[in-house]
Amino acid sequence: MRKIRLGMVGGGHGAFIGGVHRIAARMDGRYDLVAGALSSDPARARDSAADLGIGADRAYADFSDMARTEAARVDGIEAVAIVTPNHLHAAPAIAFLEAGIHVICDKPLCASMEEAEAMAAAAQKSKARFFLTHNYTGYPLIRRARQLIAEGALGAIRVVQVEYAQDWLSRVVETEGQKQAGWRTDPAKTGGAGAIGDIGTHALNLATFVTSLGVEALAADLQSFGPGRRVDDNANILLRLEKGARGMLWVSQVAVGNENGLCLRVYGEKGGLEWGQEDPNRMTLNRLGEPKQILTRGGTGSGPDWTRIPPGHPEGYLEAFATLYDEIADVIAGSERPLLPGIEAGHEGMWFIEAALASSKANGAWIARR
Amino acid sequence: MRKIRLGMVGGGHGAFIGGVHRIAARMDGRYDLVAGALSSDPARARDSAADLGIGADRAYADFSDMARTEAARVDGIEAVAIVTPNHLHAAPAIAFLEAGIHVICDKPLCASMEEAEAMAAAAQKSKARFFLTHNYTGYPLIRRARQLIAEGALGAIRVVQVEYAQDWLSRVVETEGQKQAGWRTDPAKTGGAGAIGDIGTHALNLATFVTSLGVEALAADLQSFGPGRRVDDNANILLRLEKGARGMLWVSQVAVGNENGLCLRVYGEKGGLEWGQEDPNRMTLNRLGEPKQILTRGGTGSGPDWTRIPPGHPEGYLEAFATLYDEIADVIAGSERPLLPGIEAGHEGMWFIEAALASSKANGAWIARR
Amino acid sequence: MRKIRLGMVGGGHGAFIGGVHRIAARMDGRYDLVAGALSSDPARARDSAADLGIGADRAYADFSDMARTEAARVDGIEAVAIVTPNHLHAAPAIAFLEAGIHVICDKPLCASMEEAEAMAAAAQKSKARFFLTHNYTGYPLIRRARQLIAEGALGAIRVVQVEYAQDWLSRVVETEGQKQAGWRTDPAKTGGAGAIGDIGTHALNLATFVTSLGVEALAADLQSFGPGRRVDDNANILLRLEKGARGMLWVSQVAVGNENGLCLRVYGEKGGLEWGQEDPNRMTLNRLGEPKQILTRGGTGSGPDWTRIPPGHPEGYLEAFATLYDEIADVIAGSERPLLPGIEAGHEGMWFIEAALASSKANGAWIARR
Amino acid sequence: MRKIRLGMVGGGHGAFIGGVHRIAARMDGRYDLVAGALSSDPARARDSAADLGIGADRAYADFSDMARTEAARVDGIEAVAIVTPNHLHAAPAIAFLEAGIHVICDKPLCASMEEAEAMAAAAQKSKARFFLTHNYTGYPLIRRARQLIAEGALGAIRVVQVEYAQDWLSRVVETEGQKQAGWRTDPAKTGGAGAIGDIGTHALNLATFVTSLGVEALAADLQSFGPGRRVDDNANILLRLEKGARGMLWVSQVAVGNENGLCLRVYGEKGGLEWGQEDPNRMTLNRLGEPKQILTRGGTGSGPDWTRIPPGHPEGYLEAFATLYDEIADVIAGSERPLLPGIEAGHEGMWFIEAALASSKANGAWIARR
């Protein structure tokens, strides 16, 4: 099977999510990482590239140069992963789309609704495709949950409870030189959002992905508990979804004891389901009037879809992420993979951020999605 | 040890909570049930009394008669348990308080704020004491949680997440002759509230009991998902508590697969704790920068307080309820037991119900506690 | 409903299991504790009785005197609970059986096979009944498990894994004045057994109760890890049960971190089930080729049998114990309750103890049940 | 970083573990798979190679040819993964060791003690290294457990309970054309063992790896529950380990409801720890007299060793496997990685198999390790 030539923007030494993208791209053996603008610091860009086996001639200091040069090469990259902080998504994404190179972009989409519109326009015009790595949609049981709901296993959805709790910002570590905390709590780099952008967009995406229901309105109460912190680190949000479903969304980065607690619970007329990211290989399915069921990844009632190894052999975060890369490879090879998140999901996320900020400013007034 | 002579109003054949009160009163051997107005139906009152070994002369058809007669007997009851539907709490409570008989009243306090004020006034004037059975405060680990927070183990509280999810009203069983569902979904008997009164008051009480923080304001979005249902069966509520703590409260009686899912999570500057009523003998304690701890009832770090049997031998709902009765017996015998909920907790619950109804009517506007 | 007049032998100040029996007897309101020989120390016997509201004239210093005197009274006790250490079961049990008074005896049955035979003979001759409080059989889901297996839900049983792990003897606390540890590690009082008698008999009983399969043979490897300890504190045992089922039984009182870890797993041709005493309100049921099911006490698939309160309101150890007392009251009132353990279960337990000791002495040779 | 040239023997279409090895080798980007003798069927070998991007000239039909040819190439493979059924491990392993090519061999080591001795001799003589993929030793918390015990956190070890339960052979699927079941239940291909070889060797290895205690003797009771099955599908085994530790080992492939239930519990004088493979990112640590602790992969108390992503982002089976490949690459590059299992672990496993078969034949007699 021919491998896809992949480039990367961001993800040099000291970054987090770039390394995750690289493992995800390697997992199923369908990509070769051959070019990169891995850092805005030239020396770091060069050294990082060398460590990854990227030839010196394809280690770029600048993404525009990279887009132009790679587009011109016979063996140029076919796709690029953008793994920079939020405020550095839009420009490279547009550049590569314009160069006809597929874009695999980390979330949230960008740093403002204006950027989002520009990215959507670029994606619209390009022959290349745009993918957004809402990686939690790659978990097999999350896809199974979506399928169950689409098939009507829960009946009409009534209640959605979603939360994403972490604790790594319980102390004000951004003042202690922690690089990840640094840009994630800097409004200039995030677009103004804190937890709602970093993890809130994941939570919202998970809820709408699984239920196939869009959000109609939200009412938000945001807090910045960390002394001196300039972005939200906790958010309590009421949701109104399509078809009368109602819910709540909680995100926190100061909930001591929570590592990466993304949890979704959905209840309908006829059933309910419950899933947590830290134990992703099992999901509770409650059918009204029947005993509680535990579905396992790959096990009875879930089937072999989107998995690599038998039930009981845990797959995790990296495998879910890799499933996105695997399906993106399918799309690049000409197939359709309708579960992959794209510009639409990114737009919804940007609305969520802006609406949450606006609602909280307005003392929790409902903000409707246009 | 001398036993306390106890009476009961409500709790005849077909009732639920009356039986629970009786087991709770028997558990530690400190009460004798000797009188009752167990039903407003005279035949049922008589038969129910006979089954419970209450002499025919002390099986009353009417609570006023009972209060008067028992107060006049040398061997009259010292305390009465009121276990009727909400709208039938105030009148008997006031009658027994006026008769100088201690009142042990089920929750919520009553059916309106006016009744609450009248009960408070009666309690104020009486030499007898008033107790409200917010039974979940009787769980040993809940009391330990309160203690830990009071001692500062979590630092200043930031976030409170509390929920109480059930599923027994997923279908409209009140139209099928289910007695419990009948009165609990009848606004005339509940005072207008559904889930928020029946279980929401428990959730709120648990949160304020454990944190020692009062609620300052709430914003509520209530739903009645059951077709034709006249009271709320789901409520999504934002909370603002004292000292800057913020939170959410979710109650539902249509969350399929939840039996009695009362769960509390509290996070502060220095730690977090998590407890669920269905697994009440363990609590998670997270101290910032230390491994997660599991405290067990009676085990290391929790101590022997408020328990009867060694760790690992599960105690449950009935034992927690009985602990209230045990401490009430102490109070009647002349000691103080400051953890017992009383008229104040009841008043807070009535405010919660009225505020939630008002906020939801006003599209989620914040309602402050006066 | 008329209450049964109950006496107690043992269970004075400082004892553990006596208090449990008393709560169990009170829970459902069917007994009055009216007489006792609560301690072999006359002062402690008298004081303990007074605290329990037992009249001074019925506070005996000696069980023989009690049996004789109570049998002669018009209002004499109808049943007696024997809650002394193992080596003091046989004599009072026989005395009360001979006096025509029903015996409710704690486990293990006694201290030797000879005593067991004598007790069986006395029970045989008496018009009174003999009950053995293998209290774990009172858990609703354990009874449901037995029912499921009897109905064939698992098919022919293949594998039984049972274990009972505690840690309270990890240190040699018997040398530090801990009363419970004192007699339980004194071979003269236990009959020679340590953990295998104290908790191993419970584990074995649970396995045979649930599967309805007797043990045919065992091979045991016993250890005394506590320095200087004279009885076993850990036992690794292979089991051969009827109809070709095979299994293992592990008991330990030195397994640090285990409070009261009695767990049973049974696997058959068509299914498996798993239950743990510390979380007794749920049981896993695996039907071959179907998703895993979680049955809850009182919930769908388990039914309301042997429970007092709705699903989700946890019942525990005391309620399970009380269910034995409740059914014993039924038997005394003239009904049959076939699930109650009696002399047969006691005999099996005594064989288990003797066989485990003999096998271990013979380097793990198989010992068959005669 | 230069990549290591890797070959593979076995692992063609329809195989299971070969695909796992390939993902493990890809995960951290340190290997290139460039040659293979993927099947004994020439057409399948060729097609499988093509699918994996192996050049036609390096797709061998025969491992001897491959060893000889690759050893002679300037760009020949440096290491080979052997992923054939048990009875086809020894010959290729010896051939590649003799050719000076590092061997990464799946477990169990081989099909007989004689083969084991021959492999050990070949490894001894070769300049190349031999690695055995006891992949469960790659889990970060398992390595942390070993470390904790080595540091004395549990004190002297007393009790080891290890089990590995599956259910995929509950029915006799080997008669239905299931390829995996076919060879794994064929004594000619396994060397006579069933579950004890396939998974029992993993369980034993895990126990000895974590405790650093060898086995001194075992007593086994093996069963073949599947009608007509020629190898064991369940085994109940008593263990005696070094320094007085005692334990039990249970393996089953007929325990309905168990997917891949490898669980280890170790108890010492001062503490205990408990870990299960299906939830590998958390481990319970019990220190005597302290509350139970939950250590998480990468979290407080566990540290960042052997992990790729932050706590709360679950890693699983493939990552643990990949950690072996990662460390093997270190060794090939010249470093030592003392945790990697090699010929010694393989030899212990072969003794375990032979001893279990012999003991069971001798009605559970103890077999000592020479």
Image (cartoon, coloured by chain):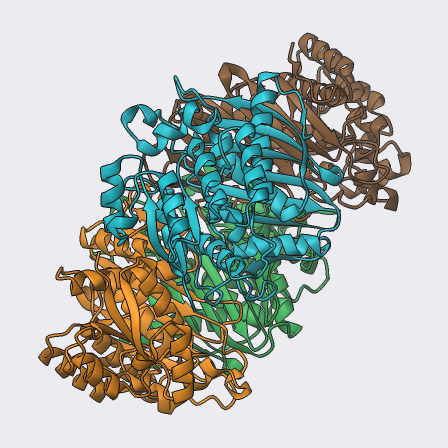
Chain colours: A orange, B green, C brown, D cyan
Say which quadrant the N terminus of chain C sits in.
top right
Say which quadrant the C terminus of chain C sits in.
top right
Q: Position of residue B359 (x, y in %)?
A: 32, 77
Residue at image x 31%, y 78%? Answer: A36
Asked if residue D151 lies left or right of residue B313, the reply is right
Count the marks.
0
Quadrant of the image occupied by residue C105: top right
Query: Which residue is nearer to you in this view: A67 or C233?
Result: A67
Asked if residue C83 lies left or right of residue A85, the reply is right
Residue at image x 47%, y 40%? Answer: D93
Query: Which residue is nearer to you in this view: A176 or C284?
Result: A176
Residue at image x 50%, y 63%? Answer: D307
Quadrant of the image occupied by residue B227: bottom left
Q: Position of residue A319 (x, y in %)?
A: 35, 58
Query: Which residue is nearer to you in this view: A180 or A200?
Result: A180
Query: Which residue is nearer to you in this view: D72 or B136?
Result: D72
B6 versus C144 height, above or below: below
Residue at image x 78%, y 38%? Answer: C225
Q: Position of residue A32 (x, y in %)?
A: 29, 66
Asked if residue C202 lies left or right of residue D309, the reply is right
A177 versus C312 height, above or below: below
Q: Is residue B219 visible?
A: no
B193 versus C231 height, above or below: below
Q: Is residue D136 visible?
A: yes
Q: Position of residue A1 (x, y in %)?
A: 22, 56
